[in-house]
Image: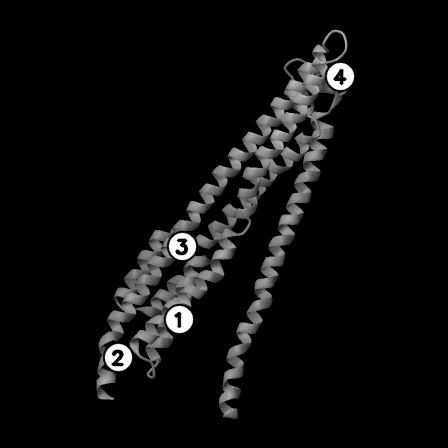
Amino acid sequence: MEQKNAMNKPAARPAAAAAPKSDAKGSGSSAFAIIAILAAFVVSVLIYMFVLGDGSHFQGGSNENNPISGDYFGVVYKGGPVVPVLMTMFLLVIIFSIERSLTLSRAKGSKSIESFVRIIRQKLNVNDITGAIAACDQQKGSVANVVRAGLGKYQEMSRERHMEKDQKVLAIQKEIEESTALELPMLEKNLVIISTLASVATLTGLIGTVLGMIKAFSALAAGGAPDAVGLANGISEALINTALGISTSALAIIAYNFFTSKIDELTYSIDEAGFSIIQTFSAQHGATDHSNTTNV
């Protein structure tokens, strides 16, 4: 019994060591998101103050005056303090879209997913498991990692002589499912930020719109003659914030749907390759397992 326990202990160590690695990935992702948000906000504030608010865009050389006719930098600056917040959200959509593009590109691997799955199926048809594993090593990426885990379990179950065929198939299927569950969080990481920006940007733009309309009506209700300049600035602020909010939200929605469809393609490829592995194992080892059971 002690020898058996001693043999089981080393097998448990890799699983225990895998947890800190996963935690490190999660903390790294959180750190990147925090740094990206802070950097985008600082850049947006600097652009708002020193580029959009530069005196050259305003009459008399001061940003307290009205913008020069046709100068859109000055017009956007008059959108008020909500503008740098909306600019931050716009930059974040771009930053996380680039990050997701790079991540999904690495997850896909060196070749197209279709050609990789086709190669795996060809190797499986001739029962060349070693060649299929070599193809996974060349492909790399999340899909190849899941397929390689399934193929490794395939080889392990092929050498197993004390399990029924159904148990072996379930073991392979479980290995593929567990590997997929480990890879999916990396693929879907930061998508929640993009989807949140799609909703929050519209609401933030609406806040800027309301503030601008408040200023416009205040100018309209001023004692004596209405303040035409104040009315124009208030309406301009409302429209600018509305435009920035809608633009940011639209870009975020497009990015979210695009990356979601790409993830669905990857998961479909994983399912297709996993199904081929299980079907091949059932076909190649069904008769052997049956004969072994009969002899016993």
Nearer the observer, 52 or 213: 213
Check residue 251 in the rendering and tell me which mark sits there, or answer none. none
Coloured how? one colour
Q: Is residue 176 above or below residue 156?
A: above
Q: Is residue 90 above or below residue 151?
A: above
**Mark 2 crowdedness (10 Å alpha carbons): few <14, some 14-19, many ≥20:** some
User: Type of residue at label 3?
Assistant: Thr
The quarter of the rendered structure image containing the C terminus is bottom left
Q: Residue at x 68, y 44 (%)?
A: 38
Residue 65: where, in percent of width, then height?
Answer: 75, 16
Check if mark 3's residue and mark 1's residue have beta carbons within 8 Å: no
Q: Residues within 10 Å of mark 1 (few under 14, many from 20)?
A: some
| Residue at the top extreme, as displayed | 225
**3D distance between C-alphas at marks 1 and 2:** 19 Å
* Label 3 sits on residue: 267
Residue at (49% x, 40% y) in the render: 255
